[in-house]
Image (tube, rainbow, N blue to C red):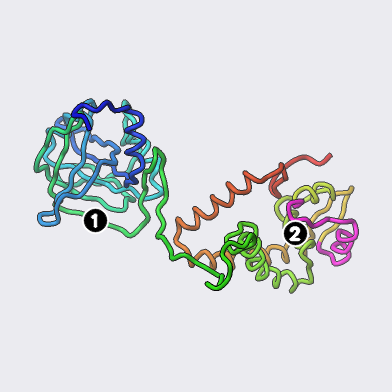
C-alpha cells in the first residue's frame, strides 16, 4: 500500500460503519458555567488499573474549547430507549439541556438520568488525532444499571439481543435440503400461530364460540356498529366469513344485536369478549416473558414489516372507515 493512498471519504465512512458501537453522550461544564454535551460513539476503554477511558472530539466542534478547559467530564452510555436524547445532543446550535433533568457531578458536570452507565472522569491526557482531539480520562466514579444499551451500526440505531443457540427440530438423519423444512417461513409462522392461538381458543370455546364468532366479536369490541360487509373486510385476512348464519347465531345467543343492518355487542357479548382478550393478553405476557424486552420489540417489529411486505391491501380491524 502506498504511503498516500487516496481514500474516498464516503466509502471509508461506510466501511467504518460496519463496526457496531455503543452510543454515548459526553458532558462537561464550560468555563463560563454553561453545561455542554455532545453525542459520541468514539468511546473506548483504555485501562482497568487505573480505570481509564478515552473518546475523541472533532477539532471543528463548538464544544472543543469547553472540553479542553474542563478538568472533569462524564460519559453516559445510553440505554436503548434514549434515541431521542442521542439525537438532541448530536445537534448543534440549540439548548440541548432545556427540559432535561440532570444531576450535578464532580466539578459541576451535568449527569443525565436513565442511562446504562455513567462514568465521571478527570482529564488525564489530550492527544492530537488527525482531525480530532483524543481525550483520555481517569474514571473517578461510576454507576450502572442492567438495561439494554443503544447501539449504532451502518449509520442507523440498532438493538442488541443476546445471541441464542441455534434451534433445530429436525433429526440429524433427515435430509436438511428438503423443500419443506423447519426453516420454511410459512411453516414457522403457521406453527407458532396455531400453537399460540390453540391456547386462546380454549377460552373462546368456554363461551361456546367458534373461531369465526370470536373474530367477529373481537372486531366489534374495537368499534361497535359495523355492517356485515365491513366485518368481513375487517378480518378478511383470517379466511373466515361473517356469514348471515353466523351473525344470526350470535344474535340468538344474545352476544350481539342488529339495528339498521349494523351489528352491536350486547353487554353479555362485550363481557365475554373482554374476558377472552384478557386471557389472550395473559398468555402473551407469559410467552414473551421468556424473551428479553428488546427481543420482544424486535420480534414484533419484524412481524409488522413482514405484514407490510406481503399485504395485498387488506384492512386492519381498528381501521375506522365509514360504512356505505
Residue 133, percent across and down?
17, 33
Q: Distance between the residues labelled 1 and 2?
A: 49 Å
Q: Crowding near pointer 1: few (<14 within 10 Å), some, many (20+)?
A: few
Find numbered disc 2 in the image and state the secondary structure of the residue it sits on.
helix
Vertically, is 180 above or below 100? Answer: below
Vertically, is 14 above or below 263? Answer: above
Vertically, is 256 above or below 39? Answer: below
Find numbered disc 1 in the image and state the secondary structure of the residue it sits on.
strand
For the point 57% across and 60% down, the residue is: 183
Left or right of residue 179, residue 109 in this image = left
In the image, 182 versus 288, the foreground residue is 182
In the image, 167 versus 26, the foreground residue is 167
Residue 127, percent across and down?
12, 36
- Quadrant assignment for the C terminus: top right
For the point 49% across and 53% down, the residue is: 298
- Confirm whether residue 275 shows in the render: no
Which of pointers 1 and 2 lies earlier in the amino acid sequence?
Answer: 1
For the point 78% across and 47% down, the residue is: 233
In the image, 312 versus 99, the foreground residue is 312
Q: In which quarter of the image is residue 286?
A: bottom right
Vertically, is 136 above or below 188? Answer: above
For the point 21% across and 29% down, the residue is: 2
- The residue that mark 1 highlights is 143
Rendered image: mark on residue 215: 2
- Confirm whether residue 47 shows in the render: yes
Residue range in magenta is: 235-255
Q: In which quarter of the image is residue 1?
A: top left
Amino acid at each position: 500500500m502506498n504511503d498516500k493512498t487516496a481514500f474516498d471519504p464516503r466509502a471509508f465512512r461506510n466501511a467504518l460503519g460496519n463496526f457496531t458501537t455503543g452510543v454515548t453522550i459526553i458532558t462537561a461544564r464550560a468555563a463560563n458555567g454553561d453545561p455542554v454535551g455532545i453525542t459520541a460513539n468514539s468511546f473506548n476503554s483504555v485501562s482497568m488499573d487505573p480505570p481509564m477511558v478515552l473518546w475523541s472530539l472533532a477539532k471543528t466542534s463548538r464544544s472543543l474549547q469547553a472540553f479542553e478547559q474542563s478538568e472533569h467530564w462524564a460519559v453516559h452510555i445510553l440505554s436503548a430507549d434514549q434515541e431521542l436524547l442521542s439525537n438532541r445532543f448530536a445537534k448543534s446550535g440549540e439548548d440541548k439541556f432545556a427540559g432535561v433533568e440532570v444531576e450535578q457531578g464532580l466539578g459541576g458536570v451535568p449527569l443525565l438520568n436513565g442511562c446504562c452507565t455513567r462514568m465521571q472522569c478527570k482529564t488525564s491526557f489530550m492527544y492530537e488525532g488527525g482531525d480530532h482531539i483524543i481525550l483520555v480520562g481517569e474514571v473517578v466514579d461510576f454507576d450502572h444499571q442492567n438495561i439494554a444499551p443503544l447501539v449504532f451500526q451502518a449509520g442507523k440505531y440498532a438493538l442488541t439481543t443476546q445471541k441464542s443457540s441455534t434451534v433445530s427440530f429436525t433429526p440429524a438423519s433427515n435430509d436438511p435440503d428438503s423443500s419443506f423444512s423447519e426453516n420454511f417461513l410459512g411453516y414457522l409462522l403457521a406453527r407458532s400461530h396455531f400453537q399460540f392461538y390453540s391456547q386462546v381458543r380454549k377460552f373462546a370455546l368456554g363461551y361456546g364460540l367458534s373461531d369465526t364468532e370470536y373474530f367477529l366479536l373481537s372486531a366489534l369490541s374495537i368499534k361497535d356498529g359495523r355492517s356485515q360487509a365491513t366485518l368481513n373486510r375487517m378480518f378478511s385476512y383470517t379466511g373466515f366469513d361473517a356469514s348471515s348464519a353466523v351473525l344470526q347465531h350470535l344474535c340468538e345467543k344474545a352476544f350481539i344485536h342488529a339495528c339498521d343492518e349494523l351489528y352491536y355487542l350486547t353487554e353479555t357479548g362485550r363481557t365475554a369478549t373482554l374476558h377472552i382478550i384478557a386471557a389472550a393478553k395473559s398468555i402473551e405476557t407469559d410467552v414473551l416473558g421468556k424473551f428479553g424486552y428488546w427481543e420482544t420489540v424486535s420480534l414484533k417489529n419484524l412481524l409488522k414489516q413482514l405484514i407490510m411486505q406481503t399485504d395485498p391491501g387488506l384492512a386492519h380491524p381498528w381501521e375506522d372507515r365509514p360504512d356505505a
